[in-house]
Image: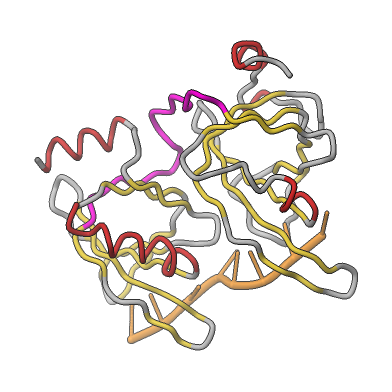
DNA sequence: CCCCCCCC
């Protein structure tokens, strides 16, 4: 197994990895990890899990673990940790499903090697991010299978803004934020949707969104300093 | 190889 230093030298940014190739090393930071989701249709049955990863340039990419890879890779991809991915495969995104990257996503093969890195990537900025301070967390609303939870946030101009968390953002992240709300955490939202309801500007999560809690990025530090 | 993309 190559060392951390050797792997770092071989690393390519996602933007430079040749498309549809499977001989490369990237280093990514985990911004989102779904739970294990079972599926069943006419052709296939199994489980999958999706990840959203970001590299040092701020390029985000989705990765899907299918079936045996869910179990095989279960000790990897903790939130807010960095990993080397060696010899994964870059596949074209399936237009039927949402993906955070327009063209490609990562698939895992039997030849793919994952190695945790001891140093986090030094990303200062994620593409499409909104950095705010948490003000209030409202309660979870369940309607049928739908789950949503509204939170109120602010920026340094005191623009109070409503963000609606959907699905597992409402359940998992929402519950975590409920517990942390008095600490006034800084939140980084990536790839969210802007909406106008009754003349009010608001934000909603979508399935490709990610939420970073107290991210170690410049904008978060500036906002924290403003608040203190 | 794939579930969700929504609401007052």
Q: Looking at the picture, does residue A84 appear above or below residue A48?
A: above
Q: How many marks?
A: 0
State the image coordinates of residue A180 (x, y, percent, origin top left). Answer: 26, 57
In the image, residue A57 lies in the stretch drawn in magenta: no
> Going by the image, does A81 lie left or right of A214?
right
Q: Looking at the picture, does residue A59 appear above or below residue A7?
A: below
The residue at the far left in this view is: A228
State the image coordinates of residue A204 (x, y, percent, origin top left). Answer: 40, 64
* Colour mode of the rendering: secondary structure
> Going by the image, does A226 lie left or right of A50?
left
Give whichever of A108, A179 is nearer the camera: A179
Picture residue at 26% right of the left edge, 67% below the top: A137
Q: Looking at the picture, does residue A38 appear above or below residue A97?
A: below
> Going by the image, does A138 lie left or right of B4?
left
Picture residue at 46% right of the left edge, 87% below the top: A143
Q: Quadrant of the C terminus of chain A?
A: top left
Picture residue at 83% right of the left edge, 74% below the top: A41
Label the magenta part by its dominant secondary structure.
Answer: loop
In the image, residue A131 lies in the stretch drawn in magenta: yes
State the image coordinates of residue A1 (x, y, percent, origin top left). Answer: 74, 19
Q: Looking at the picture, does residue A81 appear above or below residue A64?
A: above
State the image coordinates of residue A133 (x, y, percent, origin top left). Answer: 22, 50
Q: Hey, which quadrant is residue A97 in on the image?
A: bottom right
* Chain part drawn in magenta: A117-134
Picture residue at 65% right of the left edge, 62% below the top: A36
């Amino acid at each position: 197994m190559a060392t951390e230093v050797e792997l770092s030298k071989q690393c390519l940014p996602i933007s430079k990895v040749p498309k549809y190739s499977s001989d490369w090393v990237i280093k990514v930071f985990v911004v989102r990890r779904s739970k294990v989701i079972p599926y069943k249709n006419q052709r296939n049955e199994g489980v999958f899990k999706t990840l959203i990863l970001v590299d040092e340039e701020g390029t985000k990419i989705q990765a899907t673990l299918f079936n045996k890879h869910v179990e095989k890779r279960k000790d990897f991809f903790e939130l807010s940790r960095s990993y080397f991915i060696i010899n994964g495969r870059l596949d074209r995104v399936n237009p039927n499903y949402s993906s955070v990257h327009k063209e490609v996503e990562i698939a895992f093969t039997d030849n793919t090697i994952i190695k945790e890195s001891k140093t986090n990537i030094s990303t200062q900025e994620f593409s499409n991010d909104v950095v705010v301070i948490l003000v209030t967390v409202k309660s979870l609303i369940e309607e049928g299978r739908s789950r949503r939870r509204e939170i109120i946030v602010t920026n340094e101009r005191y623009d109070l803004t409503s963000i609606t968390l959907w699905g597992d953002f409402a359940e998992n992240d929402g519950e975590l934020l409920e517990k942390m709300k008095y600490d006034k955490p800084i939140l980084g939202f990536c790839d969210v949707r802007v909406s106008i309801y009754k003349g009010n500007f608001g934000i909603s999560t979508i399935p490709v969104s990610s939420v970073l809690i107290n991210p170690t990025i410049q904008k978060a530090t500036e906002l924290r300093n403003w608040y203190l």
